[in-house]
Image (cartoon, grey):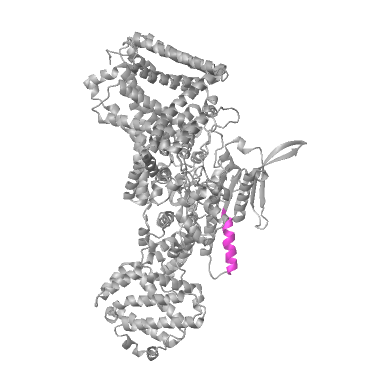
């Protein structure tokens, strides 16, 4: 289109068509098509993943209420899944009731081990354990004994129903009792248990006949339908009281046997009197037939009592259980109280009804190994570490006591309130992401195999000693656990006390778990041909005798060189230990993972998946497992991350595996076909830099070599995630860097070439495409705003608005809607909602979604969008990604302003200010679409993006708006900015050291990266080019001289700053007065020139403000170009660039700090922020405010 009133200098005059306008309008629209495809993929993957999960029976048992309704079928499902041969045999030989009893007897052994393991982990209390355990059935039991949490309050409820029943309503009463299966079971169990206990107490046959006669009367009346006619239900409460008194006597400790027998006799006589007079209508008449009735009338019955059986544990358990059934009137709906225990119970029960292969016998199962790489993470918390207080006066132990109050109470109860220092250290260690926790979890595999062996062994073929020996030996043949600790040899030889403590902790682990093996790299000085040289060995050791206290070497293999120097640390740590693993399958477990006993029980089943042929008779080579994120229970950030990761490892990977067939290995607890992979390149690509995300390359490698990868929802492993804002951002940066390197790798190229078109698209959108589209989302915002800036400055926007045909074209506005949806994290939220709906219900999902928005989840996801885009783009431009240690500690503590600035300055703050300036310039000089609601929505979404990038780190920073901490942060930041750098000075101590490290990637980039960096920096000159022609002092001139003079102003500003810098160096402290006079002279000169221009050429205040908007971006652009050309700049220019960058950092920090200081001055803001950040904790009743304020409760237990 032709523009009559072009407001800028025409670089190429006499051109009929304006290419710049076409680019400004259509470039964002074209980029949006990339995001459209990603959004459609997110929608379809959510729908199909949810449907696929429903067909796999995910979430059929979501609550304990659902578990109660289906618990009767759980033992049978357990037998079918884990002991199919026993189930088949019992079906052919026994009646239905006998089958159910046998199933319950077998199931109870595993279930009780499961419950006891949770008690050992302090997830449940002693009372919860008692309610959840299934009593062991004996051969003479004629009734199935269900866990007490199913039968709680059933007897009192049945008594109330019976008491309100009218005569001649036997059928109605029986129907009401039978309508509740567990009420009927409780009534039958109480009825038969009372008879059993009384028979066991009585020695006199005459007394037994009385009891038998009463039971016969009850049975006959029930059979004839005359129960309510012959028995008075109004007397049942009194009978219950008498029975309760009798049971209390039986449970009490006794010293004098005669007195004890007399108490029992009296209680039994009272029960008998109540039965015959208050319950039975014709009790005396009914008992006339008993020859011993006269003795009972004379008070001489029940005097011969047998107290031998009372001392037996089985007897005491029966008495205690009967007492509970009769007296417990509360609901057991909240048993267990711990949310993690409830989740584990419901997931295990639900998994029994999912599509799971039947387990083979232990002797026939595939053997497998577990491999865990370890470097320098926490092993075991020491007492000093737990009690060491931070700057707020909070210790790690105090923090854990407040975050896990129920588990701390359960722990003290288990220790009988006499816990030792070692016990406390272990308890705290199992709440962190430590090696002790990982080893304990993985060793559940062996414990599960031992129990499975015991369940399979026949009871008549061998002695108990032989059975025990077999149950111990077979798991060792089927399971091996190797921890690859590459620095163990260094720790052994170190004189540092901390290193010695870590080595001792690893040794203690080997002594605690005899099946554990540790592999490490041993470096030795050896003499070869008369010359000393270093030799490297891969060594496998195990724990020795407990009394010995040393490890024992098993294997030693000489290596050709130092493996960690050749490749990356973690992959080489796995590779050198791979040879020490055994078996047909290999599970890789990260240091921050955990396992559970009930999940370890399913290992035989999941290994059978290797035998199931899928897709053209191809057997799986990698079995994908789901994870449970156990770190999402406190802060909102941890909850967001937990939901995001949970949706990825469930619904997303479920859809990737089937039907897309593009699931790979993501560093999760996947199980490899060990033989397949060790003969085809191993499980870890070890090339430095390019294989930063070494895990996914194992999946690439498997797929390229004809492998097939599946995903299974019926088994899960625990996983710890980063819980602080800085930790999460470092993790996202690491993943984005890894995806950038994947984009450049030949593995991705080969997969793209070999896949068909549809599978190639699936591969793209589920791997590097997601990060590329994240970058495109940000680029779309940039192109949109820079395009609008060009249209406004050139006057073309006004021309477009005046043309009605063009004005009706809203394609740009409509096209940018997907960008806003992508920006706020919709693609991540959709799978979350679907998976939560599946596993917890739609109402829970809807409530969680609303709460997430109230807790500013959109701000978090928008901020992480910037993290992905920045680090992915930097890796594409310059390469050189590196491993970032994210930290796995406990984070509810305040991060200093300087820490946040170092981490986010270049990735978020600079870009946020840039977009903010673009929006301000556009609003000042543009004519906005006031009547367009779509355009207003888009503009608001970009302002939301700016606000999120600038202030999210402070919003999600605990105590980020506390006044005292704000003051301390400012002082710390000024100290950091002023500290001189140099060799050995860490970036955390000095701005200069940080500045050098921040631009380290430019030292090693190639010429392509430097040229692209310079081209991208040229965008900052657009502000100056557009604004200077709109200054009042320009007087509407379109001459190139206006733009040239603006560069003269910039040169003068640089010259002045250089004079001040040189003056500071030359004059220094000795001539401080002269230096001050020089600065005053320069200031007065500038002021005089400004006044002269104002009077002579019409310079206005608005011109000065506009000049700031124009020249600040120009200076930053010059700085970026200078940094890209840094290798060719001499020392003087380098120092000038450094000082110029320091000045910009001062300006940005001041602009960031001012709103923070204002909000910190308002006390309610800090309280509101705490509520947003820790709503999860408040809902659990945790004392987060105490932790944040550092006010320790002195009365809390130590």
- Can see residue 740? no
Q: Quadrant of residue 97?
A: bottom left
**Left of 360 or right of it: where is 538?**
right
Residue stretch rendered in magenta on the structure = 463-479
x, y percent for residue 715: 45, 52
On-image quarter of the N terminus: top left
Determine whether 484 is above or below 246 in the image. above
In the foreground, 818 or 923: 923
Q: Quadrant of residue 1085?
A: top left
Q: Residue at x 50, y 19 (%)?
A: 1122
x, y percent for residue 833: 35, 45
Determine whether 380 is above or below 561 in the image. below
Q: Which residue is most to the front?
A: 1073
| Magenta span includes 34 | no
| Dominant secondary structure (helix, strand or loop) of the stretch shown in magenta | helix
x, y percent for residue 971: 49, 32
Q: Residue at x 31, y 70 (%)?
A: 177
């Amino acid at each position: 289109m032709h523009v009559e009133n072009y407001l800028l200098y025409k670089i190429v005059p006499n051109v009929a068509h304006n290419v710049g306008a076409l680019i400004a309008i259509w470039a964002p629209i074209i980029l949006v098509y990339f995001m459209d495809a990603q959004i459609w993929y997110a929608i379809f993957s959510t729908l199909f993943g949810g449907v696929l999960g429903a067909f796999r029976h995910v979430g059929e048992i979501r609550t304990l209420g659902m578990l109660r309704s289906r618990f009767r079928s759980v033992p049978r499902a357990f037998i079918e899944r884990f002991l199919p041969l026993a189930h088949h045999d019992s079906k052919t030989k026994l009646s239905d009731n006998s089958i159910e009893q046998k199933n319950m007897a077998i199931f109870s052994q595993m279930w009780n081990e499961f419950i006891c393991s949770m008690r050992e982990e302090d997830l449940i209390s002693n009372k919860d354990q008692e309610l959840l355990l299934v009593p062991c059935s004996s051969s003479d039991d004629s009734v199935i004994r269900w866990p007490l949490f199913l039968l709680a309050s059933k007897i009192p409820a049945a008594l109330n129903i019976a008491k309100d029943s009218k005569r001649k309503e036997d059928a109605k009463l029986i129907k009401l009792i039978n309508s509740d299966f567990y009420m009927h079971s409780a009534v039958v169990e109480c009825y038969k248990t009372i008879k059993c206990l009384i028979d066991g107490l009585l020695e006199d046959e005459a007394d037994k006949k009385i009891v038998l006669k009463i039971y016969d009367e009850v049975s006959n009346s029930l059979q004839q339908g005359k129960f309510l006619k012959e028995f008075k239900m109004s007397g049942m409460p009194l009978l219950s009281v008498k029975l309760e008194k009798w049971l209390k006597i039986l449970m009490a400790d006794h010293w004098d046997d005669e007195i004890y027998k007399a108490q029992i006799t009296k209680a039994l006589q009272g029960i008998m009197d109540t039965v015959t007079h208050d319950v039975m209508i014709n009790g005396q008449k009914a008992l006339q037939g008993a020859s011993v009735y006269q003795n009972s009338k004379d008070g001489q019955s029940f005097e011969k009592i047998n107290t031998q059986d009372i001392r037996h544990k089985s007897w005491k358990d029966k008495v205690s259980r009967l007492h509970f059934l009769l007296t417990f009137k509360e609901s057991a709906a909240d048993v267990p109280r711990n949310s993690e225990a409830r989740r584990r119970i419901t997931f295990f029960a639900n998994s029994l009804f999912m599509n799971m292969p039947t387990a083979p016998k232990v002797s026939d199962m595939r053997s497998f190994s577990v491999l865990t790489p370890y470097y320098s993470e926490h092993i075991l918390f020491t007492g000093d570490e737990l009690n060491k207080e931070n700057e707020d006066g909070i210790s790690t132990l105090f923090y854990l006591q407040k975050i896990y109050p129920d588990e701390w109470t359960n722990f003290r109860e288990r220790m009988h309130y006499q816990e030792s220092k070692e016990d406390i250290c272990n308890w705290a260690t199992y709440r962190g992401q430590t090696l002790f926790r990982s080893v304990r979890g993985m060793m559940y595999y062996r414990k599960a195999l031992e129990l499975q062996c015991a369940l399979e062994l026949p009871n008549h073929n061998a002695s108990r000693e032989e059975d025990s020996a077999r149950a111990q030996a077979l798991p060792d043949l089927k399971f091996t656990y190797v921890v690859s600790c590459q620095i163990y040899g260094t720790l052994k030889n170190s004189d540092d006390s901390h290193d010695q403590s870590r080595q001792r902790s690893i040794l203690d682990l080997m002594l605690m778990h005899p099946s554990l093996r540790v592999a490490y790299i041993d470096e030795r000085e050896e003499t070869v041909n008369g010359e000393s040289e270093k030799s490297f060995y891969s060594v496998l050791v195990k724990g020795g005798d407990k009394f010995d206290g040393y490890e024992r070497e098993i294997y030693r293999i000489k290596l050709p060189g130092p493996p960690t120097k050749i490749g990356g640390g973690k992959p080489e740590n796995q590779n050198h230990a791979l040879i020490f693993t055994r078996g047909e399958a290999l599970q890789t477990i990260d240091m921050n993972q955990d396992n559970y006993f009930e999940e370890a029980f399913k290992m035989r089943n999941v290994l059978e998946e290797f035998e199931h042929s899928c897709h053209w008779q191809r057997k799986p080579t990698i079995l994908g497992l789901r994870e449970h994120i156990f770190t999402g229970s406190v802060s909102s950030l941890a909850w967001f991350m937990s939901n995001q990761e949970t949706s990825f490892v469930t619904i997303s990977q479920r859809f990737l595996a089937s039907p897309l067939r593009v699931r790979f290995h993501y560093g999760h607890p996947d199980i490899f076909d060990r033989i397949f992979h060790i003969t085809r390149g191993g499980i870890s690509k070890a090339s430095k830099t390019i294989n930063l995300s070494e895990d996914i390359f194992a999946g690439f490698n498997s797929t390229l070599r004809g492998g097939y990868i599946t995903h299974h929802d019926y088994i899960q492993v625990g996983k710890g995630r980063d819980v602080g804002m800085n930790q999460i951002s470092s993790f996202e940066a690491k993943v984005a860097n890894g995806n950038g390197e994947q984009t450049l790798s030949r593995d991705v190229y080969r997969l793209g070439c070999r896949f068909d078109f549809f599978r190639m698209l699936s591969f793209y959108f589920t791997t590097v495409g997601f990060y590329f589209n994240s970058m495109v989302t940000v680029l779309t915002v940039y192109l949109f705003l820079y395009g609008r800036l060009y249209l406004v400055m050139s006057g073309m926007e006004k021309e477009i608005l005046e043309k009605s045909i063009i004005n009706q074209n809203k394609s740009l506005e409509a096209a940018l809607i997907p960008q806003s949806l992508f920006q706020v994290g919709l693609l991540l939220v959709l799978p979350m909602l679907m998976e939560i709906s599946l596993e917890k219900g739609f109402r829970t999902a809807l409530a969680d979604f609303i709460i997430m928005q109230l807790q500013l989840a959109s701000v978090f996801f928008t901020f992480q969008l910037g993290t992905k885009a920045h680090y992915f783009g930097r890796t594409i431009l310059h390469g050189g990604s590196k491993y970032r240690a994210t930290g796995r500690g406990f984070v509810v503590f305040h991060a200093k302003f300087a820490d946040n600035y170092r981490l986010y300055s270049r990735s978020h703050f600079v870009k946020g200010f840039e977009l903010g300036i673009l929006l301000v310039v556009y609003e000042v000089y543009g004519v906005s679409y006031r009547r367009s609601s779509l355009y207003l929505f888009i503009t608001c979404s970009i302002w939301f993006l700016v606000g999120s990038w600038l202030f999210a780190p402070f919003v999600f920073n605990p105590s980020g708006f506390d006044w005292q901490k704000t003051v301390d942060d400012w002082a710390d930041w000024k100290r950091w900015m002023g500290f001189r750098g140099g060799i050995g000075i860490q970036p955390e101590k000095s701005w200069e050291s940080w500045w050098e490290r921040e631009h380290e990637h430019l030292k090693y980039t190639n010429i392509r990266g430097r040229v692209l960096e310079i081209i991208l920096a040229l965008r900052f000159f657009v502000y100056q080019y557009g604004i200077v022609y709109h200054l009042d002092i320009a007087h509407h001139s379109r001459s190139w001289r206006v733009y040239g003079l603006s560069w003269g102003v910039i040169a003068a500003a640089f010259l002045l700053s250089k004079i001040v810098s040189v003056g500071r160096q030359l004059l220094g402290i000795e001539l401080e007065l002269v230096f001050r006079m020089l600065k005053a002279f320069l200031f007065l000169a500038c002021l005089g020139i400004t006044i002269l221009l104002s009077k002579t050429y019409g310079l206005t205040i608005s011109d000065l403000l506009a000049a700031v908007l124009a020249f600040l971006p120009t200076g930053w652009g010059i700085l970026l170009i200078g940094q890209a050309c840094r290798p060719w700049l001499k020392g003087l220019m380098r120092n000038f660039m450094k000082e110029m960058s320091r000045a910009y950092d001062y300006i940005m920090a001041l602009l960031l700090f001012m709103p923070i200081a204002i909000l910190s001055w308002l006390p309610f803001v800090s309280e509101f922020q705490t509520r947003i950040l820790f709503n999860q904790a408040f809902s659990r009743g945790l004392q987060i405010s105490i932790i944040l304020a550092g006010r320790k409760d002195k009365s809390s237990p130590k």
